Image: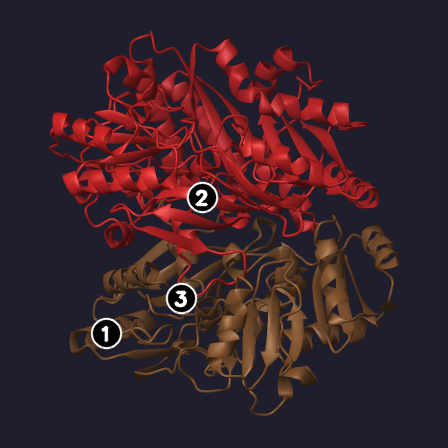
Amino acid sequence: MEAVLTRWREIVQAASANRTGLRLRGGGSKDFYGEPATGELFDTRDYRGIVGYEPTELVVTARCGTPLAELEAALAERGQMLAFEPPGFGDATVGGCLAAGLSGPRRAQAGPLRDFVLGTRLMDGRGRIMEFGGQVMKNVAGYDISRLLAGSMGILGLVLEVSFKVLPRPIRETSLRLSLSQEEALTAVTRWRRQPLPVSATAWEGGELTVRLSGAEAAVATAARTLGGTILEDREGERFWRDLREQQLAFFGNGDVPLWRISVPANTGALPIEAADILLEWHGTQRWLRTDMPAREVRLLAREAGGHATLFRGGERADIFEPLPEPVMALHQRLKAQFDPDGIFNPGRLYRDL
Amino acid sequence: MSFINDAAFEVDREPLIAELYRRLPRHCVLSDVEDLRPYECDGLSAYCELPLAVVLPENEEQVIAVLRTCHRLGVPMVPRGAGTGLSGGALPHAQGVVVSLARMKDILSLDPEQRLAVVQPGVRNLAISEAAAPHGLYYAPDPSSQIACTIGGNVAENSGGVHCLKYGLTVHNVLSVRMILADGTPVALGGTAPESPGLDLLALSIGSEGLLGVVTEVTVNLTPTPPCAQVVMASFDDVNKAGNAVAAIIAAGIIPAGLEMMDKAATAAVEPFVNAGYDLEAAAILLAESDGTEEEVAEEIARIRTVLEENGATSLKVSGNEQERLLYWAGRKAAFPAIGRISPDYYCMDGTIPRKHLGEMLTAINAMEEKYNLRCANVFHAGDGNLHPLIMFDANKPGELERAEAFGAEILERSVQFGGSITGEHGVGAEKIDQMCVQYSEDALDAFRAVKNALDPAGLLNPGKGIPSLHRCAEYGAMHVHKGNVPFPELPRF
C-alpha cells in the first residue's frame, strides 16, 4: 500500500477508536456548501494524480486529491471532457467533486454527475480499502455503491479514487441569445426539449435566454437558424457558460442575500414569487433564487411546484437540504451505521443526525 | 446444471398459504404444483425450483400485504417480472414465495411536455415506447427481450440494449421509483425534479436484482425520436482490426447510436436465418449506427466511413433506406434464436472488458473452444465492451452441460483479469454468484452485505442471489482468482 494510504488508514482507525469526527476536505472550494463541517481537518490533497486515462476507452481514473482543473486539462488535450461540467469554484478536487455531486450547465443535455461515475475506491471506517464498479461502461455485478457515493457529502467513507466516463468534446458549439420573458422562455425550452435539437444548455435571466448548441457542424448551424436570436461571438459564449458554471455571473455576486437552488420538474411555469432575483437553468428545472424570504416559505414554494429546495450559499447554515420523509431518513441512518459505525466521516455535513 | 441456494429457511407451508389466501383475493394466489410449474425458472431454464406459492398482486396495497405477511412469518420472497432474465434472478426459493408483478401492467400517465411516463412494474419495455410514439418520443433502453421484458425487471437488472453507449442504461433513464421494503414499508426514491435530496438511493435500487425491495411504480424519462437513422456495415478479415476500428471511431470523437460486432461463427449462424446480406467471408463485421437529423447523420456517417476505411475494412455498405437498416439489425437481433437453431442448447455469457482487450479475449475464447471441445459464436456490444459469447452444447450429451458451464466461468474470470466485469447487463442472479468472489475482494463483498443489511436486515428478499454469503466464497476460494492474480496461470483449470 502507498505510504499515504498507510498513514490515512492509521488516522481513520484512530478516529474510529476514539469516535472523533474527520472533516474531509480537498481544495476547500465547497466549504460554503452543505451543513456546517465539524471534526478534525483531513486534507485529501496528499493523494493525487491521474492513474489511468485511455481516451479510446472513454474512461479516466484519478485520485481524490487531484485538482479538477488538472483532470479537465488532461481531457481537453485529447479532445474530451467531463460532460456534466462540474463547477470548480476555485480549487476543487476530484474527491470533493464526487462527494458534492454538483453538475453544471451541460447537465441539461448530458445528465448529472452520477450518470458518469463508473467506479470508486473507498476507505471505510475500519480503514479497509475496497473497489466498486470499475473502468468499464457496463457493470451490473453488485450494488451500485459508486453512484451511492456521488453527492453523499463524504458521509459514507473516504473516496480514494474515482473512474469517470468521459465524452468527446462537441465538434461545434454556438451560443445565441433571445429576448424573452420568463414565461416565454419556459415555454420555449419545454418545446425544444421535446425535439431532437442539439441544445446542450439554457439559461434565462433578466429577460434574456441564452442557449448553447453543441454537435455536428450542420446540425448546429441549422438549429441556430431555427431558434433565431443573436449569435454570440464564440469567446463571449464560452465565457458566459464558464461564468455560469463557476457562479461568476453578476447574478451570483449580489452580496449577502441567500442563494437558493430550487429543483422542479420539467414544464413547471414561473414560480409565484416577487421578492427574488431569478436565474433559470437546465431547461427551467434548476432555478437559482436570491432572496431573503424565510426558508420555510422558499421550501413551501418548491414543494408546491413538485420539487425541493437547497440553501446553496449564505443565510443561516442549518437545514440546508430538503428534509427527508421518515422511512427514507431511516434508511440513511442504517446505511451510515453500516459504512461508518463510529460516525467519523463528515459528521452532520449532509443532515445533522448523520 | 444445478444451483445450490445456501440461504436456508424453515417455513411452515400450510399456515403461510392460509395467511396468503386471507390477505389476497383467491385468484391472486397459486399454490397447486401444476400452477407453480410455469414459475419454476426464468430465462435461465437450466436452474429450476418450485416455490411454496406464487402471488400475483394487482395493486400496491396487495404487494405491501404480501411483504408484511412474509416478513412476519420469516418467508423468503422472490420478485418476478416477465421471467425473461438470463441469470436466474427470478429462480424461486424452495421455502419461499414468488411475487409476480405481471398483473400490475398499467401505464398510469404519460406526459409529453414533461417527457415522462409513470408506469406499473409489469408494463413491458416496448409498450412504453409504443405508447410514447404518437408524441414523437420513446423509452431509450432496448434490451433484446424488450417485446416481453417488463420495466420492473429492467429496474432490477439495470438493463441496457444496443443503444446504451449513447443513450445509457436503465439507471440513466429512470427518474423515480416507488419501492416496498422487505418489511412492507413503502418509500419513494428519486423524483421528477433534478438532484433529489439525500443519498442516491434510486441509483442503489437500480440493478439490485430484487434484493433490496419490490418496485411498484416507475417513472421513466422519454427521449425524442431521432428523425433519421442510418447504419454502416463493415467487414474485416481480422477480429483485431475490427477491434481497432472500434477504438478509432471513439478516438475520432464519435459516439455512434449503436456499435455492434459479430464474429464469423455468429454471422454464419444468422445469415441463413434472416438473409441480411452479411459478408460470410469476413472474420468479423461491424454495425455502426448514427441517428439524429438528416444533416447530422449524413455528416457522422461520412466520418465513420472514413475511419473504417482507414482501419482496413474490406468492404462497406451503408443502409440506403429504413427497410435496409432494419434488415442489417435483424441479423444482430436474431443472433440468439439463430444459434438456438443450429445447436440444441446454448449458454449466453455477459462479460464486459475494456475494448482494447477484445482481440486477446477472442483469441482466448478460440483456445477455450478447443479446450472444452465446444463451439462458441460471439456477438459483442463493441461500443461499451460488453461481450456475449454464445456457447453451443447439447444437454443430452453427457458432460457437455458441465463443460459449457466451465467454459462460461472461464470467460468471466478472464473478463475480470482484463479489468472488466462478470456481467454487463444480465445480472449476477443465481448463475454468477460464485464469480462475484472473483470480481470483488472480501472487503467489497462485505460492503455489499452491509447495504443488504441496512435495507433488508432479515435477509428475506431474494436470498442466496446476487451477493455471495461469507462461507460461499471461502468454499469457492479453492480456485479463487482475483484481479488477474492467477495462481499458476500456465496450468489449465477444469
Q: Amino acid at mark 2?
A: Glu
Crowd rating for badge 2 (residues with CA inside 10 Å; few <14, some 14–19, many 20+): many
Whether labels 2 and 1 belong to a single chain: the reply is no
Chain the render paints red: B
The N terminus of chain B, quarter of image: top left
Per the image, the residue denoted by label 1 is A10
Q: CA distance from mark 2 to mark 3?
A: 25 Å
Q: Is the residue A353 above or below the residue B235 in the image?
A: below
Q: Secondary structure at mark 1?
A: helix
Residue A295 at what x, y percent from top left? 48, 80
Specify whether A291 is left or right of B22.
right
Instruction: Please tell me in which quadrant of the rendered image residue B302 appears.
Output: top right
Per the image, the residue denoted by label 2 is B217
Chain the render paints brown: A
Q: Does residue B283 appear anywhere in the picture?
A: no
Per the image, the residue denoted by label 3 is A152
Q: Amino acid at mark 1?
A: Glu
Could you tell me if the residues under marks 1 and 3 are in contact, i.e. CB atoms within 8 Å? no
Residue A39 at what x, y percent from top left? 30, 83
Residue A346 at what x, y percent from top left? 33, 75
The chain carrying label 2 is B
Q: CA distance from mark 1 to mark 3?
A: 23 Å
The C terminus of chain B, quarter of image: top left
Instruction: Please tell me in which quadrant of the rendered image residue B276 appears.
Output: top right
Specify whether A107 is left or right of A224.
left
